[in-house]
Amino acid sequence: MTVAAFMELALYDPQHGYYARAARRSGRAGDFFTSVDVGPLFGELLELQIAEMDALLRSAAEAAGQAQTAATVDLVEAGAGSGRLAADILHAAKRRNPRFYDSIRLHLVETSAAARAAQRETLAGTADRLASSGADLPPSFEGVLVANELLDALPTHQVVMRDEGLREVYVSRQSQVGSHESVGSHESAGLSTNDVRLTTVEAPPSTPRLQEYLDRLGVALEPGWRVEVNLAAIDWIRDAARRLTRGFMILVDYGHEARELYSASHSAGTLTSFAAHRSAGAESAAPPWLQRPGEQDITAHVDFTSVRAAAEAEGMTTIALLDQTYFLLGLVERFKQQPNHQSNHQSSIINHQLKTLILPGGLGSTMKVLILGKGVGVPALAGCSFKVRLT
């Protein structure tokens, strides 16, 4: 099977998939750490940006005589998990902007049934805003879509360039236990689990879309270079863009522009796995991501160039692509203008959370924010007011 098919099973199989078997995988007790795990500040800052986007949509709808449309806004979170980010956003809106809060129709999109089952409890006093919860995006929506670390976890293909041309990496299963043996013409790696041995082999690409993807970018891989091609991310953004009738998308993830992702600096590929906050080591000759399927996260860096191009092909406009540091610093100024009833202890906590969220070399520069719009022009957003910079 392709690496993408393996990831689909290892991460999302309803019974044995990594994400399917638990309502929450991140945090100090989990396997990795996200901006949401830092504390509620990330959601509170996002709420300010979403509220501004809603005001722009509301103003445009009222100017067009569409008062009924202006009365509500769809807030869609894709890859919502148990709903912690949505809860932080809603609590902030309820406290700061009751009119905005009352207009929200929340749609939580999550493939894990265990995570969906925990959403109402997580939302607690804001569950009245929940309009839908399911595995798929709403058929049609107008408002704001948020996705925090979703695209990096979508199943990706892996390819390698050889002298004879592009080859794809496949996962093979052998019913034998023993030392590693050659299965493909170039390499094989194995993992023994009882009597099943997982290996990687190389063969012709499973679809011409892989070469077409690289050709579209003008990428010329050198022999030996190994890279990921995430067709699922392209399909997802195209689908999301078609369903969004008017509004914005805020996509937060780690990755690079194509010119950097498909260069010598990443020629070994970015596919990796995480368990207990550490990238899994090579316990055997098998790639770390192939070990213990269903028990660890698997992820690869996002190609923002291709994601942006696919969205634009569906009628969306790129408003900005910038480091999380600069996005949040733009929102901090507006955050400071909010009524302040915080104790010194609360202020200390907020300052600590902010430092963690914007720290260069950490979440601040690792995470990128892609802001897209549809039918909204290119407004000057608060999140882009500090500096639009990508490192």
Image (cartoon, helix red, strand yellow):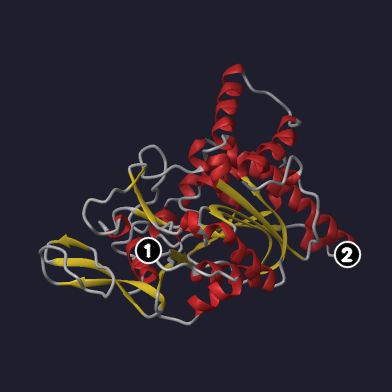
Is residue 227 shown to the viewer in this render? yes
Furthest-top residue in this view: 344
The quarter holding residue 326 reads top right
Cβ–Cβ below 8 Å for labels 2 and 1?
no
Residue 65, disc: 2
- Residue 345 image point, x, y percent: 57, 19
Where disc 1 sits, the SS reads helix
Residue 30 is left or right of residue 214, and the answer is: left
Q: How far apart are labels 2 and 1 at the CA level?
A: 44 Å
For the residue carrying disc 1, how many other residues have a C-alpha within 10 Å: few (<14), some (14-19), or many (20+)? many
Where disc 2 sits, the SS reads loop
Residue 323 is left or right of residue 317, and the answer is: left
The quarter holding residue 168 reads bottom left
- Residue 277 image point, x, y percent: 37, 42
The amino acid marked with disc number 1 is: Tyr
- Closer mark to the observer between disc 2 and disc 1: 1
Residue drawn at the location 45% of the way across and 59% of the way down: 267
Q: Which numbered disc flags the more N-terminal residue, 2 or 1?
A: 1
- Residue 253 image point, x, y percent: 54, 52
Observer-nearest of 168 and 194: 168
- Residue 34 image point, x, y percent: 48, 44
Q: How many marks?
A: 2
Q: Is residue 329 above or below residue 150?
A: above
Residue drawn at the location 49% of the way across and 57% of the way down: 264
Is residue 91 shown to the viewer in this render? no
- The residue singled out by tag 1 in the image is 12
Q: Is residue 77 above or below residue 350?
A: below
The amino acid marked with disc number 2 is: Gly
Residue drawn at the location 78% of the way across and 66% of the way down: 375
